Image: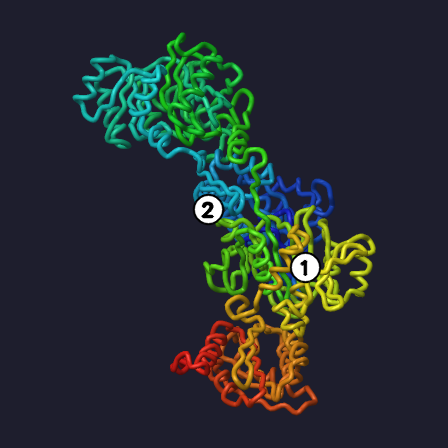
Amino acid sequence: MKILKVQALRGPNIWSINRKKLIQMRLDLEDLEQRPTDKIPGFSERLEAMFPSMYSHRCSEGAPGGFFSRVKRGTWMGHVIEHIALEIQTLAGMDTGFGRTRETRTPGVYNVVFSYLEENVGMYAAEASVRIAEALINGTEYDLAADIQKMREIREDVRLGPSTGSLVEEAVSRDIPWIRLGTNSLIQLGYGKNQVRFQATITQFTSNIAVDIACNKEQTKRMLEQASIPVASGSICVDEEDLKATIDKIGFPIVLKPLDGNHGKGASINVSSWEDALAGLEYAKKYSRRVIVEKFITGFDFRMLVINNQLVAAAQRVPAHVKGDGTHSIQQLIDIENQDPRRGYGHENVLTEILVDRDTLDLLTKMQYTLESVPEAGEIIYLKSTANLSTGGTSIDVTDMVHPENIFLAERISRVIGLDVCGIDIMAQNLTQPLKENGGVVLEVNAAPGFRMHLAPAEGLPRNVAAPVIDMLYPPGKPARIPIIAVTGTNGKTTTTRLLAHMVKNVGYRVGFTTSDGIYVQNHMLEKGDTTGPLSAEFILKDPTVEFAVLETARGGILRAGLGFSRCDIGIVTNIREDHLGMNDIDTLEDLARVKAVVVQSVKKDGWAVLNAEDEYCVKIAGTLQCNIAYFSLDENNPVIQSHCKKGGIAAIYENGYVTIKKGDWKIRIEKVTTIPLTIGGKARFMIANVLAATLAGYLYGFKTEGIRLSLETFIPSAALTPGRMNIFSFRDFKVMVDFAHNPAGYLAIEEYLSAVDASKKIGIIAGVGDRRDKDIRECGAIAARMFDHIIIRQEKHLRGREADEIINLILEGVGSVNKEVTYEIIPKEIEAIKHAISIAEPGAYITALSDVITNAIEIVQSYLDKEAGLYEETVAEN
């Protein structure tokens, strides 16, 4: 077997709209295509022995053991690898159960698709599953435990922490979208101007001053003391002299902890001798130059969590410990405790495995124990000096037992320090009595407190402490999303996107949009290039200034990684024509329609899909949708339009020279086509179709007809506003048009337009694109022969795996298939081709440059036009 490609899909995709996180592996079975599982001796038995838990895989049988039955009867290895990839993730603590395996049109080559929770783990599982399958086929030993441990380690490196994860889960439950900003815990909730950010449990509203105060334990203690809040007596020490003075003042026992420490690092608890105090000082100074020395307060360790100045949870924290049984050693008791299914690696489970470290050994030494000591039955052996869950501690929920006076105290502390999310550490005998009565004290106030002890306590009620944070970030009535209109199709996407963006801007929104030539916010280009994929969409959605997004969405990005958004308000499919066929398993128009359909399938249920009623594949897509549907057509008598409107549906049509909205039997005329500049006086019918799609989308979103009309009248096609979309340059004696048409459908649209153009001679500059099918390149040549009197063929770029001569010969075959007198010449370089066309242009000539590099062509033509106007004398630069 050979892995040809592994890719991660992160948004709605061709396999599933709802299951966004999928791994897609292209796998060549090679000779195994002829060897299904029932033809491999012992394979089924070895598989069941390695993965007995796979009995739960129902597969198509729909019952436990179903997959094993399939393997015994015979199934293909791609199917087996799909199930292995899912199972090893489950064994590593990431239970995810969606998978698909489909053969491609290349015999023996399969797309193996399975879900993942962590992308890096999913990518690892893809390769590991193939290795495991090969070992099972060959009957060789395989270290499955090593793979599972490796996946756990990868997950711990890349996963969101339990606090961050709980906030994301709560946001998702409220249909709030989220984006991870980088690889750490910085998260964006919402899109565009409605976004908020947080990192761990620090939000964008958390006061920077408050965080500084909380991180400065000395300052915190001083402010609390001045506010009559009980704190432990003590001071800051930097050397032995300070330490001695402090101990003389407060006496033993003491606590030493680094001033700038966290998670209990560098702390020494219940120190009762000068020698231990010196050792504790040196230990703490490994983490901070200044060390807090305080009176050790006897009692229990409590954490009170205050969010938005309200107490939401309280927990008693218990340091990691074991209970003696009179038989086992301390090390054996630790090993037994770590077998508790609630304990796991890192943050994978409710509790963390207990690891032996310096703190553990120091505590045992104080009790005159070693790891080999056998404690008496019932004796509690504490293994950590702090109660942090990350070091194996446990928690007990005590929220319902907190005395009202202590609730008042905690909420007051959050205001004194100024934190919106505040963790307060308290040492006291209990929280059922006021601290001033039971001698309890506040030890610390924490910015970015951990939530795990409250979300999943070892004892007591779990508390959904993420909910009040999301309530604070998104109070009732505050939206999280911005409107999104997504545009796809074969031709017309960019023009439709730009026209819609113009419309959105005119009605008062700050618009961000992506096109095949760049990313824009309010017509300011921020990134140049083909930006029609998911990363470009995310770029716009991450921009805090954007109020409305219009996203051109091409097939390549959908196939590569899925959509860059979870859903949209309106989706548009302009048309589905022959283009990019024969690539990435997209071989037919049905395949292409399946890709384009992803955009409109992601429309929210009360949103709208805008479809081309004249395109049979668009009409077929309508049957797969769960949202509202509207159609557009250049023919008001189109049967799809007629049937749709009879049922009360909405459509946009071209009738009696007008762009018109039709609702049932009613017509709302928006504007006369001849007054819409984009249509070139109504001659460019394919531009009228783009106008209909954009007009219908604007109307459905709720834009007033006056705003739509004004936008249509003021959207002037030009090299600046619509680069490469019928950019016409009028010279003194002839005209030059530059257009991005690069497939048969685009050529046909240009042919239709040129048929209405009166010219003494029509000259065409054309080129092929190497990754198109032979028949598509030939057809472009044939259409060029029909619409031009003279053709200049150039071919210097976009060879994409072919030789230039091969592409040129295919074009010439197409040209030769047309029964018409047409002359041609071959000039490889585009600059030279355009210069030559201009040099041979006779009065009344019409030059059409169908260019795949629009910027170059426009710059060349513009320089000649400027030269003719006498603006400058420079000659066109040579390549």
Q: Residue reaching furthest left?
A: 241
Q: Residue reaching furthest top?
A: 437
Residue under the point 51% across and 86% down: 838
Indicate the position of residue 824 as horizontal and vertical percent values.
58, 89
Against 259, is 515 above or below?
A: below
In this orientation, does residue 654 appear? yes
Residue under the point 45% across and 16% down: 408
Indicate the position of residue 589 as horizontal and vertical percent values.
69, 66
The amino acid sitting under disc 2 is Leu
Image depth: mark 1 or mark 2 in front: 2
**Mark on residue 594?**
1
146 relative to 176 in the view: left or right: left
Instruction: Name the image quarter holding residue 300.
Output: top left
Quadrant where the C terminus sits is: bottom left
- SS at circle 2: loop
Decide which of 806, 712 is in the foreground and name it. 712
The amino acid sitting under disc 1 is Arg
In this orientation, does residue 592 appear? no
- SS at circle 1: helix
Indicate the position of residue 190 as horizontal and vertical percent values.
54, 43
**Mark on residue 181?**
2
Mark 1–mark 2 Cα distance, whole angstroms, equals 31 Å
Q: How many other residues sit within 10 Å of disc 1, few (<14), some (14-19) or many (≥20)?
A: some
Instruction: Name the image quarter holding residue 663.
Output: bottom right
637 relative to 100 in the view: left or right: right
Against 23, is 196 above or below?
A: above
Decide which of 77, 699 is in the foreground and name it. 699
